[in-house]
Amino acid sequence: MTAGNRTRQKDTPTPAGVSRRKFVATMAGGAGLTIIPRNVLGRGFTAPSDLLNIAGVGVGGKGRSNLISLASQNIVALCDVDWGYAAQGFDRLGAEIQRQQSRLEQARTDEERRRVSEQIAGARRLKDEHLPKAKRYQDYRKMLEEQKDIDAVLIATPDHTHAIIATAAMALGKHVYVQKPLAWSVHEVRELAKKAKEKKLATQMGNQGHSSDDARRVNEYVWSGAIGEVREVRVWTNRPLAYWPQGIPRPEPMKTSPNELLWDMPAVMTRLANAMTGTYPVPDSLSWDLFLGPAPSVEYHPVYHPFNWRGWADWGVGAIGDMGAHLIDHPFWALDLGYPTSVETVSTPFNKACYPMATTTYYEFPARGSMPPVKLTWYDGGLLPPKPEELGNEPLSADGGVLFVGSKGKLLHDTYGYNPRLLPKSLHESYGTPPQKLPRIAATHEMNWVEAAKGNGETSCPFEYAARLTEVMLLGVVALRAGTKIYYDGANMRVTNPSQANDFLRRDYRQGWSL
């Protein structure tokens, strides 16, 4: 019986033949209540503390905020390929606590006060309790080999290493939470879903909006027939503008202008040295080889790391990978879209190395039972769909959103599924709140995963669902790389035309790395 499926047992024998109740009582009588390691109790048992032992891999960026939400558990190990960058994030925890304190003072509702208070408590616990004691690693393989007490692994590394780390953790029976997008390639997401099903583990993708009340309300509006049959969906985001660079060439040796000589000679000398060699020195805190992982060998450059990796085809999957998990999620879920039959991506110039500055992707989904075919269009890089006339003088949100076009009306919501409303306004006011058909999730997305790992319910966005959603997003990238409209046989994971586009469904791993 796995930890993800276990039921609570009142008097289950321990491996030594002594009942767990008697074992705990003996320990408590001899030296006070002791927290018993899980490897002593065996799989399927919960330590008296009822806490998961969690390891974090990729903790310098989004992983840090995930750890704050997980700080009520035992954070036993931390892994990052660049501890210089990760340390900077941890050093800002004090400032983060102060910022949240200001938010708490301005909170208007009890719900908002509760959530902000939880963030403050989590940041304090991470800073004061977990960081001083958690063992630190640079290589996740060494961490998994040495730390036998790990129950669950948070993975918030660049996209291209999600699959290999998650697969290694699941092979050892660890529950996994993987940041979005689930993986870099279609083949990888299918393998992750297969492994999760085989191991019966609690899995979650980090698209936190999937756990929100508003996301469920989006579904309930659609399912209740508020806007009739939906045949068209428009989805947009402002990414990558103002977040990371795209549409740029591979970096070349730096050139120094005469004006720079006048104000920063030490920096100029460094730039000149770099220009002579054509390379930048790898920071002492960074293992560039571990960063590359299964991806092709590329010389280090500061335009790649940190964070900017998302715009480079070797490591990220661009804006649709970053925000599609939040935006495409809602129509995919509400309309039960499944796999598309065709995908076409048009874009600003694409040099094959760095994703374009802006793209538009056209998906065609077939009829599903009594539901009609759907055309879904994705816009990024500042491109916007036509504004619905029902908005009047109100502009579309420049940040992003989703518009469902139905036979009886429209449904508009912001990024993460927030603020769903019917159009026209008169329809929204007359229809009221849709009947509730989905349970609400009281915990954070991260703690929803924790509870599922303990056997309390199911995760909101398990790999079974997340893999299919991510595959749809990644097919937009496949169509971009193919340079033409592709036709897709989802049941067999095969592009039927052009056949050479099948090469983009998977990647060849660098020597020494495998899934």
Image (cartoon, rainbow, N blue to C red):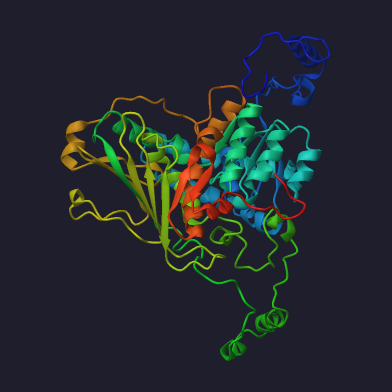
Say above or below: 129 vs 324.
above
Query: Which quarter of the rendering shows the N terminus?
Result: top right
Say above or below: 402 vs 85.
above
The percent coordinates of residue 145 (x first, y second) are 80, 39
Side of 386 where 208 appears, left or right: right
- Seen at 55% across and 58% down, the residue is 310
- Seen at 60% across and 22% down, the residue is 455
Side of 90 where 147 appears, left or right: right
Nearest to the observer: residue 487 or residue 165: 487
The percent coordinates of residue 173 (x first, y second) are 70, 30
> Would residue 406 be seen by someone viewing this image from the given angle?
yes
> Would residue 129 be seen by someone viewing this image from the given angle?
no
The percent coordinates of residue 8 (x first, y second) are 63, 14
Nearest to the observer: residue 9 or residue 352: 352
- Seen at 51% across and 57% down, the residue is 318
Q: Locate residue 85: give its quadrant.
A: bottom right
Q: Locate residue 179: give its quadrant.
A: top right
- Seen at 21% across and 50% down, the residue is 391
Query: Which quarter of the rendering shows the C terminus?
Result: top right
The percent coordinates of residue 431 (x first, y second) are 20, 32
Nearest to the observer: residue 380 or residue 275: 380
